[in-house]
Image (cartoon, rainbow, N blue to C red):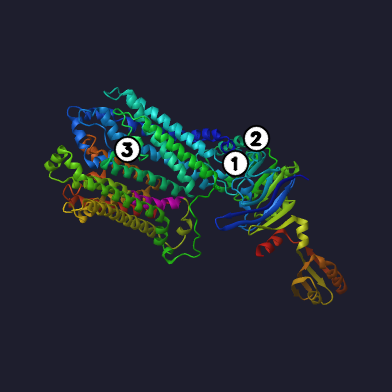
């Protein structure tokens, strides 16, 4: 697999404050990588370093095998970027700004542009100062999606969009995914990441704390089990690998380390299972664990 | 190297397209103001006009304002010499300020807004934007210079030669380029656009005031001042073209420095240390008054320093006045004849000029309330138990306090430095300077009243108060120079007030103006309580 984005040991300080301590991850060709972490963890800083907007203090960062700082222009030819907080020139219309962005990117498909303007229901004739946050966001999205790039970088792209528009954005990203494009998606909307991402990278306090596919990450965490037994359910509560045990009559709810699943199942069947439900952790659960540390 | 500026021309054309209305107003406005007074000067110059003007402008107060002339006698003082003498310095100053504002608005301001971040994700060089803006400003100033030349020549006035006109226009255009270069450097150093604007204007103001002092004491010292290279070109008389070369070289040097600074910093960062803020609010912040003081703190401190420097530098001129008089028999007679001293006359003129500038700060404080409202900073506060009246009157009182403090600082530092440079001080006492300043306080109140009216009834018009201030400032500034009809002169509020200590205090006008201003404050209050907030 070709590595489209490769970051190794990247560090960045702002004055005395370390923003990034040690960032490592890769985005492979055709992969959608969800980049998540609490506010101030260093997501946007990492993205800005990737874009060659700010300079890293240490480490390696490459896109398409080229250095992100030295060869940024070369790289920009083949990427699209949408920031989370889009500001536009108030006295130009949305349509004018989109055309300008397409021209600055070099190329861009007019038909696709019109199709997207239509899909996102943007009024391109309005001056940008009259746009709401969501509409400003649409301008940047349309501009980024209208051009043919190999890597798309989205930094909280749907902030301010309504759920309908969010869904349209997700559909468009899925199309890109099918077309084999690489995508780095930073987002707080975990359902969005869960739906789109092949791989998740979690950053906390400037360090990558977890990387892997959703399945891999799930194995590291616990599932929530609800069980109703004929016998005394409280016996389960004393077993290894069981946490947060709560009992009500013969019904118990608890979380289980995945490696202990086998012994729990054995025990439960000894007690006589009336009902057994296991819910895998959502990204949200995993996320909360990392957020809360 | 080429990479850094990649596709700057795309941004350049974008700016020209985005700004074309502004550019037209800029060139027409500054151009007509600079070149359009030729017929008026022809009128003034009729008969003994030119000779009389020559003598008037030898007054140190006038030199401090408009600069020196190379003409040795009234015979050398042609129409062209007079026009350049009275107009060039001021027009150059305006061109500098407008260019500086423009550069900051397209560099640091766009960075503040976040537009730069998006632009840099395209194939745009990291420094392409700065180059594009400088190219735009350069182009605008070149056109401006050509326009001024054309207009001046078109009047076909005697001694307004083509060469002189070209140098006059070019001096103004180059002044604009210099202002732009200064602003580009400050945009790199200071990480917020308001700070970059303020410091750029501060430097320009400082250069202007320093040259006022050196023009009176020793003109050759003004040649060391970059600002001096604009008006010491002396169009129509000496035609010192080489000074434009100095400006160009100096500007290129500044631009190179700015590019180096920009290349070495991160987007959004500056070179001034960022201090860590406090985790909890100080008690002094925890009130409407505390909050308003805090959000106006930068402007208040900045202008206060400016007032002190302004007063001190004008005050330092007093020491040279007696020497100046003894070398000029004609001036000596003029003052003896008028029954005032040269110091009193200078104080009167300079105080009026300074008080015009002192009025800027209170207007800024009043306009700030709407600016904050407009940026939705106050939305959450409007939903609290704090009443509108509280917002309004806190702002107004803060504005009045800054007006009073500004007066004390400007007149006080003028008086203090003046007295210390005169030495034997039986000529003027410290209190006379303060009295002269406070005599103009009603005019400051009047401007606060106008700003308050705008705030209450039509907040978008708040900027017009500045325009009226500039208008009346210009009328006062040029009142001694241009032969204006009395009624036109009276449209400037300061013109109603007698110029102390040269003229007598007029209690009737002082109190009438104060009462009118207070009435405006209350009318503004009614509007502010009733209108829709954003």
Q: Secondary structure at mark 3?
A: helix
Main secondary structure along the magenta-highlighted residues: helix
Instruction: Classify residue A224 as left or right of residue A122.
Output: right
Extent of the magenta region: B360-374
Q: Chain of mark 1?
A: A
Question: Is residue B43 placed above or below A207 in the rendered structure?
Answer: above
Q: Sequence-wise, which precedes: disc 2 or disc 1?
A: 2
Expressed as whole percent of the image width and height from the top left, the position of residue A203 reads 67, 57
Expressed as whole percent of the image width and height from the top left, the position of residue B342 reads 18, 45
Task: Please give the label number shown on residue A122.
Answer: 1
Q: Residues within 10 Å of mark 3 (few under 14, many from 20)?
A: many
Q: Is residue B405 magenta?
A: no
Q: Is the residue at mark 1 from the same chain as the one at mark 3?
A: no
Which residue corresponds to mark 2?
A108
Distance from disc 3 to disc 2, alpha carbons, whole Å, reads 49 Å
Q: Secondary structure at mark 1?
A: loop
Numbered disc total: 3
Is residue B112 or residue B3 the one in the foreground? B3
Task: Please give the label number shown on residue B329.
Answer: none
Distance from disc 2 to disc 1, alpha carbons, whole Å, reads 18 Å
């Amino acid at each position: 697999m070709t590595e489209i984005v490769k970051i190794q040991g990247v560090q960045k300080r702002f004055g005395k404050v370390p923003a990034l301590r040690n960032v490592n991850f890769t985005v492979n060709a055709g992969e959608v990588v969800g980049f998540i972490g609490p506010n101030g963890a260093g997501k946007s800083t990492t993205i800005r370093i990737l874009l060659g907007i700010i300079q890293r203090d240490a480490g390696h960062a490459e896109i398409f095998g080229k250095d992100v700082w030295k060869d940024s222009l070369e790289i920009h030819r083949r990427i699209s970027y949408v920031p989370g907080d889009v500001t536009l020139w108030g006295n130009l219309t949305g349509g004018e700004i989109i055309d300008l962005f397409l021209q600055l990117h070099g190329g861009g498909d007019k038909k696709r542009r019109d199709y997207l303007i239509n899909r996102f229901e943007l009024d391109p004739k309005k001056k940008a100062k009259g746009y709401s946050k969501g509409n400003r966001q649409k301008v940047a999205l349309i501009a980024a999606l209208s051009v043919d790039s190999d890597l798309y970088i989205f930094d909280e792209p749907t902030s301010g969009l309504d759920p309908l528009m969010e869904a349209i954005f997700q559909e468009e990203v899925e199309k890109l995914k099918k077309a084999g494009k690489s995508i780095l998606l930073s987002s707080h909307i975990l359902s969005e990441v869960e739906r789109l991402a092949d791989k998740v990278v979690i950053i906390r306090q400037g360090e990558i704390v977890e990387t892997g596919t959703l399945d891999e990450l799930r194995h590291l965490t616990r599932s929530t089990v609800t069980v109703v037994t004929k016998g005394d359910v409280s016996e389960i509560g004393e077993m290894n690998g069981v946490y947060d045990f709560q009992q009500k009559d013969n019904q118990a709810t608890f979380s289980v380390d995945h490696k202990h699943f086998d012994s729990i199942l054995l025990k439960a069947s000894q007690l006589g299972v009336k009902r057994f439900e296991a819910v895998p952790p959502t990204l949200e659960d995993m996320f909360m664990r990392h957020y809360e540390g | 190297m080429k990479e850094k500026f990649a596709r700057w021309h795309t941004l350049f054309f974008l700016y020209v397209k985005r700004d074309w209305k502004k550019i037209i107003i800029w060139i027409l406005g500054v151009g007509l103001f600079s070149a359009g007074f030729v017929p008026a000067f022809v009128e003034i110059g009729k008969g003994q006009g030119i000779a009389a003007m020559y003598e008037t402008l030898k007054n140190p107060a006038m030199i401090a304002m408009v600069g020196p002339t190379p003409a040795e006698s009234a015979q050398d003082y042609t129409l062209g010499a007079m026009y350049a003498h009275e107009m060039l310095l001021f027009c150059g100053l305006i061109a500098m300020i407008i260019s500086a504002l423009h550069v900051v608005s397209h560099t640091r301001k766009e960075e503040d807004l976040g537009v730069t971040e998006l632009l840099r994700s395209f194939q745009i060089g990291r420094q392409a934007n700065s180059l594009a803006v400088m190219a735009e400003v350069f182009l605008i100033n070149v056109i401006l210079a050509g326009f001024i030349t054309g207009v001046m020549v078109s009047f076909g006035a005697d001694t307004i030669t083509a060469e002189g006109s070209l140098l006059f226009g070019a001096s103004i255009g180059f002044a604009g380029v210099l202002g732009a270069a200064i602003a580009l450097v400050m945009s790199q150093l200071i990480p917020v656009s308001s700070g970059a604007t303020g410091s750029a204007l501060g430097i320009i103001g400082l250069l202007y005031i320093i040259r006022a002092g050196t023009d009176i004491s020793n003109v050759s010292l003004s040649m060391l001042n970059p600002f001096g290279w604009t008006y010491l070109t002396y169009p129509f008389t000496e035609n010192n073209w080489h000074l434009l070369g100095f400006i160009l070289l100096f500007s290129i040097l500044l631009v190179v420095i700015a590019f180096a600074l920009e290349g070495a910093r991160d987007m959004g960062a500056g070179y001034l240390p960022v201090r860590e803020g406090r985790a909890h609010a100080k008690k002094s912040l925890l009130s409407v008054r505390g909050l308003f003081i805090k959000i106006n703190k930068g402007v208040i401190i900045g202008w206060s320093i400016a007032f002190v420097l302004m007063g001190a530098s004008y005050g330092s001129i007093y020491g040279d006045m007696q020497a100046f008089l003894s070398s000029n028999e004609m001036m000596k007679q003029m003052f003896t004849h008028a029954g005032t001293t040269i110091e009193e006359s200078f104080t009167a003129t300079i105080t009026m000029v300074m008080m015009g500038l002192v009025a800027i700060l209170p207007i800024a404080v009043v306009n700030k309330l709407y600016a904050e409202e407009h940026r939705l900073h106050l939305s959450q506060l409007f939903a609290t138990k704090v009443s509108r009246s509280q917002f309004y009157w806190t702002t107004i009182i803060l504005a009045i306090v800054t007006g009073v403090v500004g007066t004390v600082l400007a007149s006080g530092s003028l008086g203090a430095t003046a007295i210390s440079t005169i030495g034997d001080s039986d000529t003027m006492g410290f209190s006379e300077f303060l009295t002269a300043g406070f005599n103009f306080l009603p005019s400051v109140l009047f401007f606060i009243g106008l700003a308050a009216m705008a705030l209450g009834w039509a907040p978008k018009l708040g900027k017009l108060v500045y325009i009226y201030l500039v208008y009346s400032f210009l009328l006062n500034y040029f009142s001694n120079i241009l032969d204006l009809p009395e009624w036109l002169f009276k449209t400037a509020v300061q013109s109603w007030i007698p110029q102390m200590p040269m003229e007598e205090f007029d209690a009737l006008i002082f109190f009438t103006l104060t009462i009118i201003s207070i009435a405006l404050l209350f009318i503004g209050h009614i509007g502010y309580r009733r209108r829709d907030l954003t």
